[in-house]
Amino acid sequence: MPTVLEKKYDTFAEFYPSYLSQHSNRTCRQLHFVGSTLALASVAALVFTGNTYWLLAALLCGYGFAWVGHFAFEKNRPATFRQPLYSFLGDWVMYWQMLNGKVSFY
């Protein structure tokens, strides 16, 4: 039987619960939130300045913080490597749920 990280999901609804299970460590979740916030700020800077280096900053912040959370704290492999689109969507759904209290910062 494939592990959560090896399984290929057909729908986001099927994927998201396993995505959340890969974020049980609060520091990992917090790093995701910080990285996503910095990525949003970088995209805003891109829009206001037109400087394309902000796109690189957005990618480095978004993925860098998340991957540190996974490798250093969660001790698992990010879902990005297996299902990049669902993982990207999962990041933003989890971000929104952290903002509105459905997923805990702690």
Image (cartoon, helix red, strand yellow):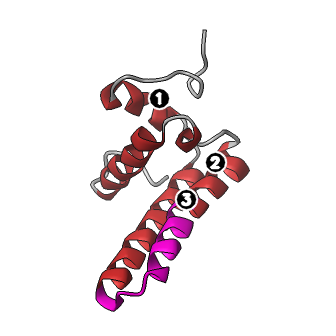
Q: Residue at x 47, y 71 (%)?
A: 58
Q: Which residues are magenta?
A: 48-63
Q: Which residue carries the number 1 mark?
A: 18
* Residue at mark 2: 70
CA distance for labels 3 and 1 = 19 Å
x then y, percent, for residue 83? 49, 36
Q: Residue furthest bottom?
A: 49
- Residue 63, how many percent across, how many down? 55, 59
**For marks 2 and 3 on the same chain, the one whose residue lies earlier in the sequence:** 3
Q: Secondary structure at mark 3?
A: helix
Q: CA–CA distance between discs 1 and 2?
A: 14 Å
- Residue furthest left as drawn: 100
**In the image shown, does 32 or 27 lie closer to the viewer?**
32
Q: Are marks 1 and 2 in contact (CB under 8 Å)?
A: no
Q: Horizontal placement of 47 versus 68: left or right?
A: left
Q: Residue at x 41, y 29 (%)?
A: 15
- Please name the residue that numbered disc 3 is placed on: 63
How far apart are labels 2 and 3 at the CA level?
Answer: 10 Å
**Nearer the observer, disc 3 or disc 1?**
3
